[in-house]
Each structure stands twice: as structure tokens, then as C-alpha cells.
Image (cartoon, coloured by chain):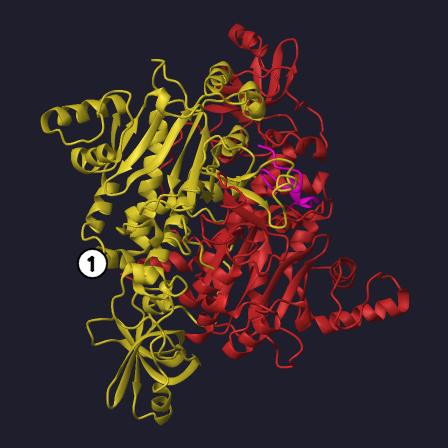
Chain colours: A yellow, B red
Amino acid sequence: MFGLPLRALRSVSHYSTVAPKQLFPTKTIKSLLADNQPKDTEVLLRGWVRSVRKQKQVCFAMVNDGSTLKGIQAILNEDDAKNLSVAFRLSTGACVELKGLLSDSPGQEQAKELQVDAVRVLGECDNSYPLQKKRHSLEFMRNLGHLRARANTGSAVLRVRHAASEGLHQFFASQEFILTNTPILTSGDCEGGGEVFKVTPGSATPSTQDEFFKKPVYLTVSGQLHAEIMASAFSRVYTFGPVFRAEESVTSRHLAEFWMLEAEMSFIDQIDQLLDVTEASIQHTTRHVLDTCAEDLAFFNQWTDKTLLDRLHKSIEKPFARMTYTEAIDVLQRVQDKEKRFEFPTVWGSSLQSEHERYLASEYCGRPVFVTDYPANLKPFYMRTNNDGKTVGCFDLLIPGVGELVGGSMREERLDVLTQKMELAGMNVEEYGWYLDLRKYGSAPHGGYGIGFERLLLWLTGLENVREVVPVPRWVGHCKY
Amino acid sequence: MFGLPLRALRSVSHYSTVAPKQLFPTKTIKSLLADNQPKDTEVLLRGWVRSVRKQKQVCFAMVNDGSTLKGIQAILNEDDAKNLSVAFRLSTGACVELKGLLSDSPGQEQAKELQVDAVRVLGECDNSYPLQKKRHSLEFMRNLGHLRARANTGSAVLRVRHAASEGLHQFFASQEFILTNTPILTSGDCEGGGEVFKVTPGSATPSTQDEFFKKPVYLTVSGQLHAEIMASAFSRVYTFGPVFRAEESVTSRHLAEFWMLEAEMSFIDQIDQLLDVTEASIQHTTRHVLDTCAEDLAFFNQWTDKTLLDRLHKSIEKPFARMTYTEAIDVLQRVQDKEKRFEFPTVWGSSLQSEHERYLASEYCGRPVFVTDYPANLKPFYMRTNNDGKTVGCFDLLIPGVGELVGGSMREERLDVLTQKMELAGMNVEEYGWYLDLRKYGSAPHGGYGIGFERLLLWLTGLENVREVVPVPRWVGHCKY
């Protein structure tokens, strides 16, 4: 009985179940292009016209269905009068069904082309269509949120998002983590400070707003504390879902709603084990995206960031750098003494600012770097106090060009130490009785980390603004639809 | 270049990427039990004591790490004085590390047992631990939300949840769907009626609450409209995430926060294609859970619902039943004429009530049944009007014992018909300009459906209350932690 589930979990292709048959009558363009079909196979395809070039005797239409970046070039000849009359209705944006022969293309731009026998316009597209065949700015496209996935950047980034999500699930399955869904609605607000969103029934008045749940309720800023509940039962768990911050500053790194991958694991007792898992999860996901989104990454490498592919390949070839906060401060202080380049202080005990993080990742290390063991007073109550009494077992992963991509820590598993830290932080210890119970009843050494999914996507695409990597982004002043 | 991505997508084990190496030094109990190890292998395991039986010369401890239902029986002998002194600290709930020889068990209860050489108590557990070795009621456990995953039902249901989630992702990958994340924060509230939650910054006052987004913002009740944006670019998409309803009634079927799988696909134009995909996604997920959670399902079959395994196996062996609303009304009317058993009307044009749905699924069909083509005036504006002008191309999937598990429809893709329907429904057409644009610019025939994930889990476990199948449930009056 045990054989099946285990094999299912342990190998990466952990799906023991029989493959479902193909249910759709038309293949995607991705499938058509990849199939090693015999020459001149008759195929049926459906998609949207990206561009049309009409010549006297022939009409070329690039057709895309979202499965690949480039699509397929369809060729409609004058000979077929029926086609020609349709060709006039073929315009950029139109939705079409084409039947024809797929053959190797003599052109440079595409591997295959479709000699069309029959065409059906499923949905016309008039001249007011805002996406024409030219490069539009990212800002222009952001204001056309409901159409931007029909253009190259907008579709490439969401295919990468899909692949990155798949790569993460795949990694955690391979390490026998259980996927859990921590709640979005929460009555705890210890991490959010003032920047939380409050949730009330739409029909409530100011005086009845807390009646629904009998207490004030907020949108979660992190699933960590809830994930710790699950790690104390399943050993290794992860949660992957939206988190929220009522962040008022408008920057290229902040959204009101974004996704976090949070992993929590019992029975690790060294920060280095945590770094090993973090590094492997990022590297595996990077590798998976390189493997499955080669065309999209080549596009970003050409148009967005010419160092992208080189940078990604290097990042999976060797381990990330590792240094303690204390070592980092040493490095920064030496640079500061010599060059006076930093605006903010570089003395032990002060926070690392963006300028410091940028220097460490982009210049000093030239690759992703883990900075570990920060001073306790810079970090939240739940991080485990090191033996030196003044630092905690935690880390930030700093990435060239992106900044902080991951944060994690060993969690304080000692009941007495944790209680003391909570009291010191001025928390209502009674309200966190459930959290202390996890230490009171069979406490396990444990730790975890959280990956900002949108920041990971910046790293994987070379894009600079998180608003580009979310299907429908929300930030201060912006909640369209 | 295209070869890799395609192979990656088309086969069910769609992961072309190299498997990450095993990063954890200890195997889970699931792995240990499944490995075909040579006899008497020395192993290390970590977990929590579920029960202890102390005899004069020997101490038996059932140890569980959440990876399986049963765990491993550890045997500590008196001979080892060190062990015995520890044994006194071994109590239910304690967290332990054990080293010893794994061998076949002579006992009936477990396949293997561990002859312990060395034991380390990582976290003690005192007598106040509320989970002792006996059956606790589901209500009792629900009030111990932070500990219930340490008991059999609580852990089994979350392993099934993990497997069902995996099965769904696997199914949609096999059919070349792109995973997209539709937003949680939304400024549209057309589907929620009065039962939406409103979101405001925690620091806002009644007069400033709508300033953050410059408009009122709500928690989503469905990602469908946003998923339609993505289907108009990627052909086939799905989204899987939390949705919210400020539902005030306390029933075993309603939560304030629950998960929905919503799929949306372009280029289908028959309701039957939609039913085919829906059926295949449910059947595949059921099959995957049967394959990977055999032990957990056997547990539920024994303790929760003795018809479970039989029912699940039957449901994947043959297609679900299909009937139109009109046929369903015929059936119900005939029964009503004969038996007068229904409280609510059974005339054409009236809603199907729970009593009707229960009769159709549990008695008349005795298996899952799709009811299709409801009267237009019972359904929302976006459903596609059938040629008869009075019904719409939609369906509910009714499941014995659970009720409505899935709802879906063809979407109205004709710009003029849709505009008219929105005006009829009294909607602000201008505000939905973006939605109409999807019809104006290259409209494709399309449809989609949504699976209530918690209801699917009721179906898969035989449990009766949705609060049992969520890691941390939220409903009216309840938002602990």
C-alpha cells in the first residue's frame, strides 16, 4: 500500500496517475511547432492575428494563441477567392480559425508556416484596436491591462510566471513538503504594523463593522505563523498565495497585493541547512524556467536585459555567496573608510540599506549573496536567538539588480526564551497562547523562509517594475476592474 | 528550441528539469516504510509521539511525522539504561529523534518497527496536552485548530487536500492550460450582491477609507471575469486561489474564505465540450487521490463514510449523468405529482432547491449529474443565450451527498447580445468597457467553470462540514489567530 504514494512523492515527476487523454480537438501552436509531423500535414489552428501584410497576390498573417511568443505565419493566396474576401476582414487583433498545410518555412523569422486552405473569422477586430504592430511602452501597456497579455512582453512574462510557479511546486514535492493553504483573513497583525488592510462586511456601518467576526480582522501580511502550526504536524510544509500591504509609497518594488512562497520545516537546527534549501529552491526554479521558457527568456535577453541569460546560467552553476551580517558590516566599513560612498551608517547594529545591499550583491559578490545572523534588535520576536545572545539565526538573500528576494530564519523554539522575547516586544502573550502551545507541546527546532514571487519574476525576466509581472496589479491608487 | 517546452507540457509528468537532490538528512516515515531496504537497516527518524505503552521491560512508542497516517512503532528496551531514563520523558505529544534498526514487525498493526538504539527528546510535552490517545469529536478538535493536524482526521484530510491540489495542477498542465493568478482585491462587485467584504487601510477613518485606491475595493467572490481577460490571450487558463463571501448563515457548507479552481477556455463552442473537461478534471483528481492517499482514504472509509471508496471508484469508472434543466423539471414534476415529496415548486422557471438537487443526484441518477441549460432569468448576465432565446448554455454539477460542486457556462461572446443583457441587468455598461472590449476586439467563443475546492474535499473524504477540510477555517463569528 505504501509503495505508490512514496514513489509518487520522491521522484520529481511525482505523478503516478495515468495521464488524462487530450481533450481539445485543436493543438496549441506550441504543440504544432514542436511536433515532428510528417511534411505537409493538414492542421487546424485557432488564435488571434498579431499582424497582417497584404500583397497583391498573397496575404501573410502572423497568428498567435498565447502558447508561444512567435506564433505561426499563415499564408493566404489570391487563388482562393473565398480566402481573399475574408482577407479583407483579417486585421490585427481578429480571432480566426485556419485550416491548411503546415510546412517548413523558407523565411528566417519562423520555422514553419501554414498554407491556408480555409479560414473562418470567429471575431472581427475594428480599427480602434489599440495594439498595432509596433513597440508600445510598458507604461502604455499597463494602462491597457485587459489587453497587455496579447502583446509580446505581457504574454512572455505570464508564461514565465506559470513556469516559475510550476518549478516551485515541483521542487517542494521533490523534498516531500506538504502544500498547505494558510488563511488570508487573520486577527493577528503583529508583522504588519500600520500597513495592514482591514476587512469588514460590505453592508456594515462603522459601528457594526467588527460584529461579523466579533473582532477586527485584517488581510494577512505573511502566512508564517500559521505555517508553523502545520510544520509542527507535517514536518515540512509550504504555502503559496497572496499577501497584502497597505503600502502608500509608489515604487517599482511595491504592490498592495503580491504572492509569497513560504516554506517552514521542522527538524533543522542550523541556519546553513535553511540556506541550502533556499538556494536549491531558487536554482531549481531558475533551471526549470530556462528549460521550459527558452524562447521567452531569449526575448527578454534581447529587449529587456542583455545580461539576463548569462546571469541566470551563472546563478545555477555555483553556490550563492554567504556572509554574516558582521562580515558584511566589515566589508562596508572598509569601503566607506576608503571611498565615503554610502549615505547611511555602516556601523555594527545599523540596518543594511538598499545602497549597502546593492553594493554587496552587485559589486562585492557579483552574484546572489546570503547575509546571515543580524543583530536581534533589528529583527522580529520569532527569530531564534544565537548563542552570542545578540544576534539571531536569520538571513536575507540579496540579488543583483533586485535587492532582497528571500528572508528567512530559524524560529525560536524554546518556550521560555520566546515568551521573554514576546514580553520584551510588548506583545499580548495571552493572545498568542496558541503559538506558545507549539513550543509547550513537543517543540521541534525549525525554520523557514519566504520568497517574494514577483521579485523572483523580476530576477527571471530582467524587468524592473513588479507591476509588469502580475496579471492584474494593485497598488496605491490603482484597482482597475 | 521548441522541443523541450513542448515535451514539458504535453506529458503528464511534464517536468523536463533534472530532479533536485534530496536535501534533508532524515527520510520521512513515509519514505522509510516504502523503501525496500535490506533487513535491519540503521535509520534515523524524527517525529512526535502519538502514544506510549510502558511495560516492565520495554516501552512502545508510536511515532508520527505527518507524512503518513500510522507512523512507526518504536521499541525501547530496558537493557539500555539511558533509554529507560529517557522513556520517562517520552509522553504523548513529545518530539523525538530516534536512531535504530528498522525491521519487519511481527505485529498486525504495522508493517515495520524500529528497535531503538539511541533516543533524544527534542521537545517535551506535559500532561496538559489536550490530545490523548482516544477519539476526539470533530467539534472538540475544531476548537483546537492549532493542534488538530496532529490527530488522525486532521492530518489525513490535509494530505488529501495536498494531493487534490496536485492532481488539479497536473490535469490542467496535461491539457496545456496556463496558470494565472487573478486578483483578490477588486473594484467590481457584480456577482457578490450584498455579501462581499470591503477592504480599507487599517489606518483609515470612515471619511478616508476609499482614498487608498480612490474607490471602494472588495475581496473577490470569483476570478472569472479576470480569467476571461487571460483566456483571450492564452486560449486556456486556470486560476486557483481564495475567494470570499460575507455569508452570515452558519451551515456545514459555507465559509467566509474558501478556495476556488476556475478554468476558462477559448475556442470551445459547445456546452458538451465544457462538461467533458469538467468531468475529466474531477475524475483525474479523484484518481490521483485514490492512487496517492490510499491509506488516508481507507481511514475515512472506516471511520467517516463506509461508502467512500466504493463511491469514488464508481465515479471514475463511467461518465457522469447529463440532463437539461428542462428534463430535470420533467423528472421532478412527475415525482411530485406522484409523491408530493418536495416543499418547493417544480415548475419550469423555478430554481432548483437543495431538495431537488439531492433527489436528482442521490436518488434518480445515483451518481454525479450535470444539469444544463437553465432559464436565462435565473442566471447571471455573462452566460451565453441559447438559440431558443430563453435558456442559457450553463451547467451545475450535482454530487450525491455534497450538492453543487461545480458551476460553469458558455460565456456570451457576442458584443451586441452581451451589451443588451448588461443593460437589462441594470449594470453600468461603461464601467465594464474593458469586459466588452474582449468582445469588440477578436472575440472568441469561450466558456469556463469553477470548482469549490472545499466541496471537492468533502466528496473525496466523506466528511460533512467544510470547516474540517481547511487548515485554518474562517466563518461568521470565527477568525481565530
Quarter location, residue A281: top left
Do we see residue A379 in this rendering? Answer: yes
Task: From the viewer's perspective, tell me whether residue A38 is left or right of residue A400.
Answer: right
Residue that badge 1 annotates = A302
Quarter location, residue A280: top left
- Name the quadrant of the C terminus of chain B: top right
The x, y position of residue B215, in whole percent, is 48, 54
- Above or below A307: residue B327: below
Q: Residue furthest left?
A: A338
- Name the quadrant of the N terminus of chain B: bottom left
Do we see residue B298 in this rendering? Answer: no
Q: Nearer the viewer, residue A35 or B128?
A: B128
Number of labels in the image equals: 1
Badge 1 crowding class, 10 Å Cα cut-off, few under 14, some 14 to 19, many 20 or more, is few
Task: Determine the main secondary structure of the stretch shown in magenta.
Answer: loop
Quarter location, residue A244: top left
- Above or below A390: residue B319: below
- The range drawn in magenta is B461-481
Q: Residue at x 25, y 90 (%)?
A: A57
Chain letter for mark 1, please.
Answer: A
The x, y position of residue B99, in whole percent, is 47, 19
The x, y position of residue A399, in whole percent, is 26, 39
The x, y position of residue B115, in whole percent, is 53, 19
- Above or below A467: residue B152: above
Let me know if residue B232 is in the magenta part.
Answer: no
Task: From the viewer's perspective, tell me whether residue A324 is left or right of residue B271.
Answer: left
Task: From the viewer's perspective, tell me whether residue B380 is left or right of residue A454.
Answer: right
Disc 1 marks which amino acid? Answer: Gln
